[in-house]
Amino acid sequence: MSLAADPLFNHGIDLDVVLIVVGKTVAVFAMLLLAVLLYIWFLRKVIADMQNRIGPDRAGPFGLLQSMADGIKLFFKEQSSPTTADRTVYRLAPYLSVLPAFLAFSIVPIGGVVTIAGHRTYVQLADLPFGILWLLAMSGLGLYGVMLAGWASGSKYPLIASVRASAQLLSYEAAFGLAIVGVLLQSNTLSTRGIVQKQSWDGVGTIVSDWYWLPALVALFIFLFAAVAETNHPPFDLVEAEQELTGGFFTEYTGIKFAIFYLAEFMNLITMSAIAVTLFFGGPSGPGLGFLPAHGWFNAWIMPIFWFMLKLIILLFGTVWLRATLPRLRYDQLMNLGWKILIEFAFVWVIASAVILVGKDEGWSLAIVIPSTAAGAVAVLGVLYLSMPKRGESVEEIR
Amino acid sequence: MGALSGFSVTLRQMFRPRVTEHFPEEKRPKPVRFHGRHVLNRYEDGMEKCIGCELCAGVCPARCIYVRGADNPPDAPVSPGERYGFVYEINYLRCIHCDLCVEACPTEAITETKLFEFSFANREDAIYTKEELLVGDDGRARRQPWELWLGDEDDHTSAWMRATAPSGQAAYEGRVSWSGELGFGVRSPEQGQEQ
């Protein structure tokens, strides 16, 4: 664990350390809120561009304050709740949804190692030794907000939507976890800081050799699919399919509670993109400015954050592009993609990369590695295929 | 590429010119026959053209026009003929801007302008009275406080043209039908018309 423990706590905990942690918490929270506001603006602008429109341009320069204005408007809207609602849970649900979204972001390494008031520390809220498990736990907890919102609304459509949400999350959690295992096999650590340090920048060549996007290429695609599905982002936004479910699980929510669900959704999206940057694209690693001292404040503070943000923005552009392009999937297409394609590929990829990595360690020759990988893949696929209900069989069981 | 080809479409659109207009700052030229709010026209000597015949009210499909005629006072006539429009009101909450009143008018008293930015905040403002509809001494529409048109946006206020030929034939009769007695708002002939 020496690879990844935050040096802030090496010399005991005093007031300075506590203040730094509190400061970091506030900064990350504020940054995430600001990022959501800017992401909504970015989303609307890019989609407008893709539809030959201009998009919001009235509030503030380039319409930057539009989401702020919308938020303020929603804040002052009338709060109404259905008479059939379970009041306590109904009020609690939005916060249950937004809290895990924020907590999940706390493990993301945003920048490098800096010195604040004589203490060396990571630009990262928490560097947990079990960081990735924390992410999985939080993304699972986020479902409670959706589930309870749907149930507590006391209304049909939100309930159906929340049941759908749990089915969707359950289906994709498996592929999501296996895709992360694909990275963990390479990194040998669960700590996000450790994963990033394993992918550190040593020149252009290390993008190919050290960043995990290439060694875990299939895992990357599975991760992206599953992350998009887990955040209920189009084309997987069946939870809020208007044609079928009116407004989805937050149909009965108004005003600021409604806005909080949106906040949570976009926070989740940003968190997932940040995790993808961490796992596959080297996190904050990137070249510093050569003409400045390598450990000066600029190269220590600004450049890692710049690289992290750049990678994040590129991925977030991808999500907007996805939203602008693809229509919503049908429910059976969603389930088929999750259960019949992604999980299979994830299993095979995990086994194949495990065999290759062990083979590398033990010095096996390729003549053993390749056939054994293929045999393992065939065995896994065979078991999965045999366990899958045949066409008509599941219908028969239901009857 | 099937489903993935859509991505290139959306990306390509990003570099196309925008079609959105910055509306209140930049206004697109309006079509020649745009149907905006009405005006009641005058002759060059200041006499009102309306004779209070109520044909516009009779033809109005939305029943939004209310007219009452009265005999002209002999010492101070309002219009050249025997009678004049004593009350003239148009309810813009009902008007559908079909222009049938303009077609029905025998004296070209009522015409439609291109002015359309007149969003009102109460029902009283929605009902335009004769004072509000009547053009000023210069022949131009008078801007009401709640209307949002500026400068020379009221050009072509007086001129008008029948949507159909007077004979009822759909084809043009080969003559310019723009009327512009005030020397204001006369437009160039349309395709198929002679000067």
Image (cartoon, coloured by chain):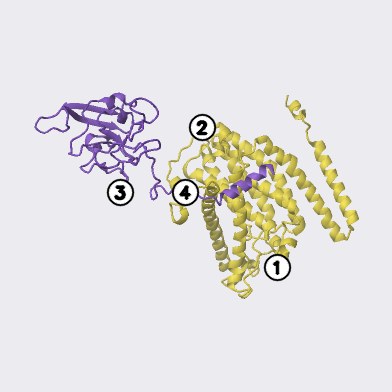
Chain colours: A yellow, B purple
Q: Which residue is mark 2?
A: A84
Q: Position of residue B70 (x, y in %)?
A: 17, 27
Q: Which residue is mark 1?
A: A203
Looking at marks 2 and 1 on the same chain, the residue that comes earlier in the sequence is marked by 2
Q: Can I make out residue B84 in this image?
A: yes
Residue type beneath disc 4: Gly
Label drawn at residue B151: 3
Disc 3 is placed on an element classified as loop
Disc 1 is placed on an element classified as loop
Pointer 2 chain:
A
Q: Which residue is mark 4?
A: A71
Disc 4 is placed on an element classified as helix
Disc 2 is placed on an element classified as loop
Q: CA distance from mark 4 to mark 1?
A: 43 Å
Residue type beneath disc 3: Gly
Depth check, mark 3 against mark 1: the one in front is 3
Q: CA distance from mark 3 to mark 2?
A: 57 Å
